[in-house]
Image: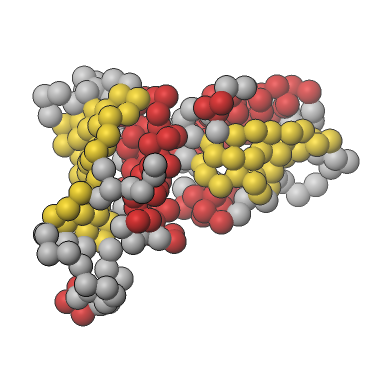
C-alpha cells in the first residue's frame, strides 16, 4: 500500500460474514484500491461486510466504490453490506440516501 | 489560504482546509459539511477538470468563501442532480450543493470555477450581529490555517 492511500484494512472471518474492517479516511486517492480489495474479497467469500466504525471520512468516490462492490456481489449471487458506520460517515451515507441500500440484508 | 493542488495532494489539502475552517470558527457538523463540500469540488477538478487546480479560501464579514478553479476543457453538462441509489457515481456536485449554503458554478475560458459559502453566524442571530469576541475591522481577510 502506498502511504497516500489514507486507509488500512484487516479481514476478519466471522460465522455470519467475512468482514473487511477499514480504518482511516477514504477519498479519491483510496477509492480505487478499496474497490479492488472489496472485489477480491467478494470473489473469495459468499457474504461480505464492510465495517466502517474506524473510518472517519468518506466522499462520493468512496460511496461509488461501495455501490459498485454491491453490484458485483449481487451479480455473483452474494451478499454485501456496510456495517457500523458512525458520526459524519453515517451522516454522509444518510444524506446521499445510500445508507439503507448498503445495509446488509437480514439473514 | 490559497493553494494549488493536484490529485496527489487532495488529502493533504483537505487536512489544511480543515485546520483553516476550524480556525475560522466553523466547527461541528457545519464545519465538516463545508470541508466535505470543498473536498468534492477539489475531487471534481482532479477527475474532470484537467487533474489540478487552485483553492482559495477567504472570509468576508461572517461568510467563509471557498473558490475552487480548474483548467478543465471538458464541455457538456455538470450533473448536480442526485443519481438513483443504485447508480455508482455522480454524487460529487450534488453533495457539494447539498452541504454548502451556496454553490456557484462558473465556466470560463480556462476552466470551471466552483464557489461554496458557509455562514459563520449562528442562524437566528439578530441582524447577524457578532455574538462572541470582537472581530477585526477588515471586511475581507484571508483565512490562514495554523499548520506548521
Residue that lies at the very extreme toward the front in this rendered image? B148
In the rendered structure, the answer to whether residue B68 lies left or right of residue A44 reads: left
Q: Which quarter shows the N terminus of chain A?
A: top right
Location of residue B25 (image quadrant): bottom left
Q: Splitting the image into 4 quarters, where does residue A76 fall?
A: top right
Question: Which residue is nearer to you in this view: A94 or A37?
Answer: A37
**Do we see residue A103 in this rendering?**
no
Point 42% across, 53% down: residue: B32
Q: Position of residue B108 (x, y in %)?
A: 12, 29
Picture coordinates of residue A101, whole percent (x, y): 60, 45
- Residue closest to the far bottom: B126
Front residue of A78 and B44: B44
**Who is closer to the viewer here, B31 or A50?**
B31
Q: Position of residue B28 (x, y in %)?
A: 44, 61
- Relative to A95, is A23 on the left or the right? right
Using the image, determine if residue B11 lies above or below residue A94: above
Q: Residue at x 35, y 25 (%)?
A: B6
The x, y position of residue B81, in whole percent, is 34, 42
Q: Nearer the viewer, residue B107 or A56?
A: A56
* Res. A44 visible in picture: yes
Amino acid at each position: 500500500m502506498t502511504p497516500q492511500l489514507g486507509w488500512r484494512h484487516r479481514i476478519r472471518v466471522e460465522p455470519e460474514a467475512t468482514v473487511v474492517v477499514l480504518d482511516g479516511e477514504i477519498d479519491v486517492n483510496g477509492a480505487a484500491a478499496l474497490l479492488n480489495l472489496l472485489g477480491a474479497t467478494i470473489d473469495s467469500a459468499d457474504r461480505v461486510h464492510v465495517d466502517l466504525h474506524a473510518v472517519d471520512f468518506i466522499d462520493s468516490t468512496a460511496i461509488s466504490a461501495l455501490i459498485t462492490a454491491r453490484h458485483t456481489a449481487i451479480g455473483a449471487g452474494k451478499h454485501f453490506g456496510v456495517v457500523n458506520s458512525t458520526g459524519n460517515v453515517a451522516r454522509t451515507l444518510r444524506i446521499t440516501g445510500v445508507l439503507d441500500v448498503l445495509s446488509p440484508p437480514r439473514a | 489560504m490559497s493553494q494549488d493542488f493536484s490529485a496527489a495532494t487532495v488529502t493533504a489539502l483537505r487536512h489544511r482546509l480543515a485546520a483553516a475552517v476550524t480556525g475560522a470558527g466553523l466547527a461541528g457538523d457545519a464545519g465538516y459539511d463545508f470541508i466535505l463540500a470543498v473536498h468534492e469540488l477539489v475531487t471534481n477538478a482532479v477527475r474532470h477538470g484537467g487533474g489540478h487546480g487552485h483553492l482559495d479560501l477567504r472570509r468576508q464579514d461572517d461568510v467563509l468563501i471557498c473558490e475552487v478553479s480548474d483548467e478543465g476543457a471538458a464541455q457538456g453538462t455538470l450533473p448536480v442532480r442526485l443519481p438513483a441509489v443504485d447508480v455508482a457515481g455522480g454524487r460529487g456536485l450534488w453533495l457539494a450543493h447539498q452541504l454548502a449554503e451556496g454553490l456557484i458554478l462558473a465556466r470560463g475560458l480556462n476552466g470551471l470555477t466552483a464557489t461554496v459559502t458557509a455562514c459563520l453566524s449562528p442562524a437566528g442571530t439578530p441582524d447577524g450581529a457578532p455574538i462572541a469576541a470582537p472581530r477585526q475591522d477588515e471586511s475581507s481577510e484571508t483565512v490562514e490555517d495554523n499548520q506548521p
